[in-house]
Image: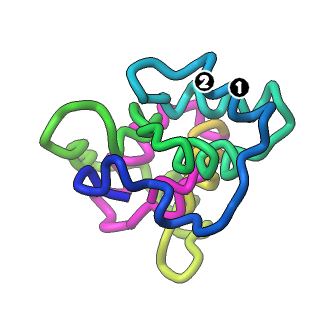
Amino acid sequence: MTHSDAGNYAAKHKNQSLPAELEAMINATQAENRLSCKQAHKIAENSGFSPGEVGRVADLMEIRLTACQLGLFGHGRKEKIKAASNPEAKLVKALREKLEDGRLSCRAAWQIADEFNLPKTTITATCETEDIKITPCQLGAF
């Protein structure tokens, strides 16, 4: 959902219910109707729910997801992460090997960041250089 969808996130989840336990955890963590990507993933880790389920429930609660760990949304800045200059060939190869339908999933981006011991935003910068779109989001934000 985009910034212009604020206050109407639930619209993409017609007739779905909220698990009370997960709703309580999100309410206890969110501030000012915002939940960071990191907080959402921590809730998923601690609750046994998937990141996608946490994102869906946040949407149903009209909670805005912020501070994407890949730097793709919710940081309050207008410019995107800048393309990497001269990305390492091994990294580019690893990214290209994980593409599905020409796109890199958020989960695959995280895995590659871990494998190469790089910040997640370095993966995003390399994807900008290589014109690789990152989607889908593990939380369902994009």
Q: Give, as a three-letter code, the residue at label 1.
A: Ala
Left/right placement of residue 83 relative to residue 123 reads left
How far is the residue under mark 2 from the one under mark 1?
5 Å
Residue 13: x and y in percent read 58, 64
Residue 52: x and y in percent read 66, 52
Residue drawn at x 80%, y 42% is 49
Residue drawn at x 47%, y 38% is 63
Residue drawn at x 41%, y 39% is 64
Q: Give, as a three-letter code, the residue at label 2.
A: Asn
Asked if the stretch drawn in magenta spans residue 125, the answer is: yes
Q: Is mark 2 on a helix, strand or loop?
A: helix
Query: What's drawn in magenta, residue-wise?
Result: 115-142
Quarter assignment of residue 17? bottom right
Q: Mark 2 points at which residue?
A: 27
Quarter assignment of residue 34? top left
Disc assigned to residue 65: none
Left/right placement of residue 115 relative to residue 127 reads right
Residue drawn at x 36%, y 39% is 71
Residue 121: x and y in percent read 40, 37
**Nearest the eye: 138 or 15:** 15
Which residue extends farthest left?
78
Q: Disc 2 vs disc 1: Cβ atoms closer than 8 Å?
A: yes
**Dot 1, how many residues are within 10 Å of its Cα: few (below 14), some (14-19), or many (20+)?**
few
Asked if the stretch drawn in magenta spans residue 98, the answer is: no
Image position of 90 with respect to 31: above or below: below
Left/right placement of residue 80 relative to residue 35 reads left
Q: How many marks?
A: 2
Residue 98: x and y in percent read 61, 66
Coloration mode: rainbow
Image position of 132 with respect to 66: above or below: below
Q: Name the residue under label 1.
A: 24
**Nearest the eye: 10 or 100:** 10
